[in-house]
Amino acid sequence: MSDNAITVRDLTFSYGTTRAVQDVNFDVRPGEILGILGPNGAGKSTTIKMLTGQLLPESGSIEVLGFTMPAQRDQIQARIGVCFEEKNVYDAMTAAENLAFFARLFSLKDFDPMLMLEKVDLSDRAHDRVSEYSKGMRQRLMMARSLINTPDVLFLDEPTDGLDPVSSRTIRSLILNEAARGAAVVLTTHDMFEADELSDRVAFIDEGLVLAIDTPEELKLAHGQRSVKIRSRNGDSTTETTVALDTESSAAELRDAMEHGEILTIHTEEATLEDIFVEFAGRSLVT
Amino acid sequence: MNTSAIKAIISKDVRAFTRDRFYLFMTFLGLAFYVGIFWFLPDTVNETIEMGISQQGLEAYFDTLVEEDGGLALASFESAEALESAIRSGDGPAVGLAFPSDFAASVADGAGTEVTLFVTSAVPAEVRGALSSMVREMAYLAAGNPALVVLPTETEILLGTDRAGDQASLQETMRPMFVFFMLMIEMMALATLVATEIQTRTVTAILVTPASVSDVLVAKAVLGTVLAFSQAVLLMALIGSFGANSLVLLFALLLGSILVTGFGLWAGSVGRDFLSIIYWSVLFLIPLIIPAIAVLFPGTAAAWVQAMPSWGLVEAIVGASAYGDGFGELAGPLTHLGIWCVAAFFAGMLALRRKVVRI
């Protein structure tokens, strides 16, 4: 048995004749956040569905917490938390009732929904029906629901998609806390900034294939271009010079740019995950 | 099977049901409405035909032709005009025969005579025909001739159960209809619960916990059956249906509840919203209600009506509540109901399983 919380090997799945996921491989360690980055329809959600037991893989293997999916689904599902892309909460029930219901499914004794709702800033609306909740509040409730069994592995499918900044911040903070606690987190998103901010490693996925998997820093260093942009004034005119930092002449060009005229602004620039994804996939993350 | 998960899902669904104002309202409204109507319906059946005759002295012929308690009550009128007037007013008999004063003498002489038959539009054609035949028989008797047809050994072959003199009242024959409407409301409530769970994808949230697809199916099936059964039993209790054969009736209602639960699971699996639930439910309702309508009309139901899934339930309800039939007498209808019940239930479970697995 490996030390990984998740081990995925050669995972493949098709919807009819359409190959959704193809020979996907990755590992996630306890306490690590793996961001799966890709445009809509890339295969992110399908991968999560197989990892959580909602879909049966066509081929390949999945091991979660030392158990094999789907053969040992029950053991796995007792120790994972899942936050879905759809806001699938019970509208006719209150937030507290929603959480209490799922706590019963996990056979949790003495579960107090208020403690969990405090974590997502919903304790003051605990007894309101979810039908009265905003999109952000529903998402926070779903996040709370995914944490009720103190999961060892957390699967989050687009957890901040379309949310207001306050709700997004609350959810990101929770994700970091869960990883700090030791939970392995698999996070799918098409938000490159979120992936960059939260992920220890990111996997680029497109058309069912994992194109690259590494830390955001390594991906940027290996595949992006760093540069310095200098704006200076010479008499009445202003000039803007961009110096690439990854060439042999970078130092000389930078020195030269600094010595000409009065410097107004200096900005460093580095490649974004979006740029690197485009380099790999040949298309943007937002489609 | 995870019993604690099943209990949790059932309790969650009961909460959802009690918060669905439409179905809660319909359940109580239906209950009050059907009970109210039931007690207003006539609880007796008058099988006697009241017939007026305008020529006194002919009663003896009728006594000869009609058996005692043969369902014919005679009322004599002084004249054909008086008889016609009484029938027209609606307060008098429904049928009348106006004999000429020389009826007996004319037929005895072999001369022709004329008898006028008065009927209201509500009198069935077969009754009119029977009265015409009766007049001819009277003419033969008056002429001193034997009857045209003699049956030395009278043999009566009955198709179905002979209910002559023991017909169920409208109240009793309407019972299956009321039960059916009650079951249908609960079927739609279950279908809505199932469809909502599927459409909002809350079921996927359940399925990534230790609860399995089987737990969800069992919970829905138990909830649907209990909802339908409890409402049906409550209705039957309120309309005074339980007597000596309560056990048979309870058993039939339980099978009926399982039957509609199967259809409810099916409708919930294919329905996308409230309107499509109504559409699918009505599609099931129409064939299912036919036997309940058929029982309102005396006589044996057509073979295709007897093939309907609900025929056994209707027969069992009428048999047990109106005629005190037991398991022995109702073995056929109960077996029929049981077979349909198993088929509908498994079809519903299969449809729901396919839907849940494919989300």
Image (spheres, coloured by chain):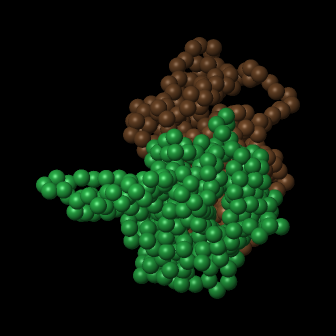
Chain colours: A green, B brown
Q: Nearer the viewer, residue A60 or A91?
A: A60
Q: Nearer the viewer, residue A57 or B140?
A: A57
- From the viewer's perspective, tell me whether residue B74 is left or right of residue A57: left
- When the figure is inspected, residue B338 is found, relative to residue B283, above or below; the finding is below
Front residue of A209/A94: it is A209
**Rendering coords of residue B38 (x, y %):** 54, 58
Classify residue B264 as left or right of residue A39.
right
Image quarter of residue A153: bottom right
Outermost residue on the bottom side: it is: A110
Q: Percent from the top left, x then y, of residue B10?
A: 64, 68
The residue positioned 52% from the left and 49% from the top of the image is A277
Q: Residue at x 35, y 53 (%)?
A: A242
**Residue A49 appears in the figure:** yes
- Which quadrant of the view contains residue B202? bottom right
In the image, B328: left or right of A266? Answer: right
Which of A104 and B18 lies nearest the eye of the viewer? Answer: A104
